[in-house]
Structures are given as structure tokens and as C-alpha cells.
Amino acid sequence: MSRRLLPLALALALALIAGLAGAADGKAVYDTHCASCHQPDGAGADGLAPPLQGTLGKRLAVRQYVPGIVLTGLAGKMVSKGVTYTGMMPSWAQLADTELAAVVNYVLGSFNAAELPAAHTPFTPEDFAALRASKPTAKQLRAWRAETD
Ligand code: HEC
């Protein structure tokens, strides 16, 4: 591809991704529903919620894990960067699949951009629709997380 066409192709690809996600605004969903616990920059808060910044790239090795925890929620102990968090991650199943895809893509693309695996493709509303049909259990989520440690 010529150098002049590349920016155009990138712009088209981004427009396509936004279109697939129903153009829900991932940052707006994050700021409304996630930032109070995980903090606006994803740094997390001791005693409240683990960081979502620079920690999720490796978790994508099991593709269903990150969307699964957002859909199902999880309570109990979680160790992140050597710190133990004992808290409650609510389920966000009440949000639309377009919002779920947008917020997860925002968290990954903004706070974890440097660690995304080269082969990673953004999540789509269809990914969430499929997961809803067989929502992962807490046990399943913990096993997937352990697999990506
Ligand atoms: C009430 C506080 C709270 C809110 C609001 C919240 N979370 Fe969480 N989140 C947690 C806690 C606590 C955990 C750890 C769960 C555990 O200890 O089992 C967690 C874990 C996670 C994880 C897994 C992190 C890891 O290292 O495996 C992801 C991803 C996540 N949250 C995303 C989100 C997103 C996206 C939203 C908004 C749609 C959100 N959270 C809203 C408290 C919260």
C-alpha cells in the first residue's frame, strides 16, 4: 500500500470499528460506571479495586476473560501487581452489548495500548451477545485469570 493511502485505510478501519460498536462512547461509559472504583486513569485504588492500567494485555491470552468479568462480575480476593484486593466487581449485564464492547475497547486501547498482543482485534457487540448466551461463572473466571498469570 502506498504511504499516501495508509492514513486513509487507517481512518476507514477506525470508522468501521466505531460503526461495529454502534458508536457507543467507551470513555463516557467508563467515566460513568467504572471510574469511581478503578479511577479515571485506570490506576485502581488500594482497598477498593485493582488497576486496569498496564495489567490487561496479558489477560487477553484467554479472550473471554476481560469481557466475561465485565458481564458477570466477581467478588472475593484478587491479586494484582502483588497487591491483594478484596472487593466486589459488579456485573454490567444491564448495559447494551454496544456499550460493553465500547467500554472494554476503551480500557484496552487507552490504558493498555502498549501491551496489547499484536494479533488482538477489538471486541464487538457480537462477542458480548455470544458470551451472554453462556455467561462464565466465578469459578471459570478465576481459572481463566490464573491461566494468564
Ligand atoms: C464497585 C467498584 C467497581 C466498579 C464500579 C467496577 N469495578 Fe471492576 N473490579 C472491581 C473489583 C473489586 C475487582 C476485583 C474483583 C475481585 O476481587 O474478585 C474488579 C476487577 C475488574 C477487572 C479484572 C482485573 C484483573 O486484573 O483481572 C476488570 C477488567 C474490570 N474490573 C473492569 C471494570 C469495568 C470495565 C467497569 C465498568 C463497566 C468496572 N470494572 C466497574 C470493582 C469495581
Image (spheres, rainbow, N blue to C red):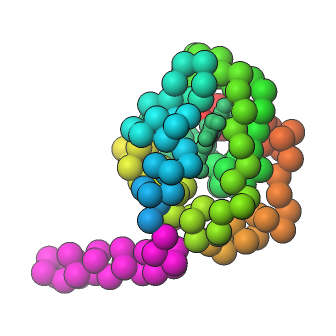
Specify whether residue 120 is painted magenta. Answer: no
137 vs 61, left or right, is right
Residue 88, located in which quarter of the rendered image? Answer: top right
The reply to whether residue 105 is visible in this rendering is no
Residue closest to the eye, 42 or 54:
42
The reply to whether residue 109 is visible in this rendering is yes
The image position of residue 138, as x and y in percent, is 83, 41
Specify whether residue 13 is painted magenta. Answer: yes
Quarter that holds the N terminus:
bottom left
Residue 75, located in which quarter of the rendered image? Answer: top right
Magenta span dominant secondary structure:
helix
Quarter that holds the C terminus:
top right
107 vs 134, left or right, is left
The image position of residue 22, as x and y in percent, is 51, 78
Q: Which region of the structure is painted magenta? A: 1-24
Q: In percent of the image, x 19 and y 83: which residue is there?
A: 5
Q: In percent of the image, x 60 and y 62: which residue is there?
A: 100
Ligand 1: image quarter: top right
Q: Is residue 69 above or below residue 64?
A: above
